[in-house]
Amino acid sequence: MSQYIRTGVSIVGAGHTKFGKVDDTLEQLIAAAATEAVEDSGIAPDEIDAVFLGHFNSALVPDGFASSLIFQAYPELRFKPATRCENACASGAAAIYAGINAIRAGNARTVLVVGAEKMTHRSTPDVTASLAGAGYQNSAFESGLSFPQIFAVAAEAYRERFGDPLETMAKIAAKNHENAMGNPLAHMHKALDFDACNSISNSNPVIAPPLRLTDCSPITDGAAALILTAEENSRAFERAAHIRAAIHINDFLPMASRDFPSFDGPAMAIASALDTAGIGTNDLDFAEVHDCFTIAELLIYEAMGLAPKGRGGDALADGTVYRDGRLPVNLSGGLKAKGHPVGATGVSMHALSYRQVTNQAGGIQKTGARLGLVFNMGGAVVANYATVIEAAGA
């Protein structure tokens, strides 16, 4: 059994901006998400004890010191402790876990967590170079890889070991685009069928062989926010969901130090979270996972134990991960179609999962959803955060 026991922390409010290419500044995105979360919870701003911001930045915007921008939402937040958390594409989960730890340590009773990123104002080459800074820089080979190229390495290694994954990856892309059609907050509202995702064309070029454009998440602006509080305090709120387990595991940064693309870190984090929660995958109603590239979602199926290594496609073939399947994955559209504003991603995944288990997910709601898994990943399978969220009273 894991050394971690029930967190004793609940989510009692959430905010989420529209993802996509937006005119709002980073400051405006942060304030909008924070305001919605506070209003959703019904808490008075002066009752918030601390704020945490998930924000990758890495030269994307000039607002490098952004934690106090959350104060722009409410003047009552002035003089509260504010901390920016960064762990590559898992910066949002890092901020949530910092908030959880502050509550568990007794340093706070209620915290506001915001994840935000402004990306679309920069050119695609600039964003690609910035994100590549999350890779290992002390290797001439690895430092020369963009993240599409890193996950292209994963796809090629999968092909060599188990067979060509491209058709399975196209099915994942088509599934997530279809799911996003029901999510008004998603960046992309364009249904793409399997044939469109599995072909190479002017509208679907190869980005990093063998990855096609439809295998890659888009460059996105957006923000999301949560109100966390001690579980015993959650009964005072109209809608609450408990964080039943929260596991964070980091791996070596150099890919050469690991059997890349083996997803050992994700498998360990997910297994530990389920063990801590006292459940198995069969108990879950849905999962939101980190599909920065379609090959990543395929490997996460295997890390979750939905299929043996090399057989992740079975989870699609038997219908398990589709909207009407036993365990729908990425009902939101995932990073692939919902969008991937890096610092916001982990908070978004938790916010929409909170809405799922409290029956507030609208067009992406799974009827009767009570128990969900969130998996947010940073870097090339380096920072791994697995959270189990359950409806209060489940």
Image (cartoon, rainbow, N blue to C red):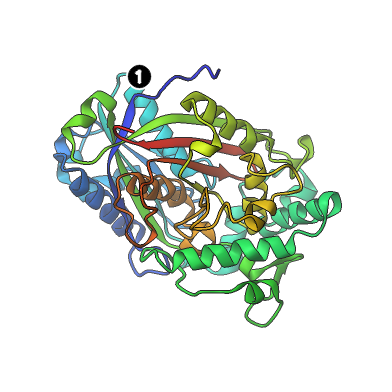
Could you tell whether 279 is left or right of 200 in the image?
left
- The quadrant in which residue 98 appears is top left
Task: Measuring from the top left, give residue 253's x and y in whole percent.
Answer: 68, 37
SS for dot 1: loop
Figure check: 9 above or below 147:
above
Task: Measuring from the top left, give residue 156's x and y in whole percent.
Answer: 80, 56
Figure check: 11 above or below 187:
above
* x 58%, y 52%: residue: 320
Residue linked to disc 1:
105
Q: Residue furthest bottom?
A: 202
Task: Measuring from the top left, give residue 285's x and y in whole percent.
Answer: 45, 44
In the rendered image, is residue 95 in sight? Answer: yes
Could you tell whether 185 is left or right of 163 in the image?
left
In the rendered image, is residue 66 in sight? Answer: no
The quadrant of the picture occupied by the C terminus is top left
Task: Measuring from the top left, give residue 287's x and y in whole percent.
Answer: 49, 46
Question: Disc 1 marks which amino acid?
Answer: Ala
Binning the other alpha carbons within 10 Å of mark 1 as few (below 14), some (14 to 19) or many (20 upward) gives few
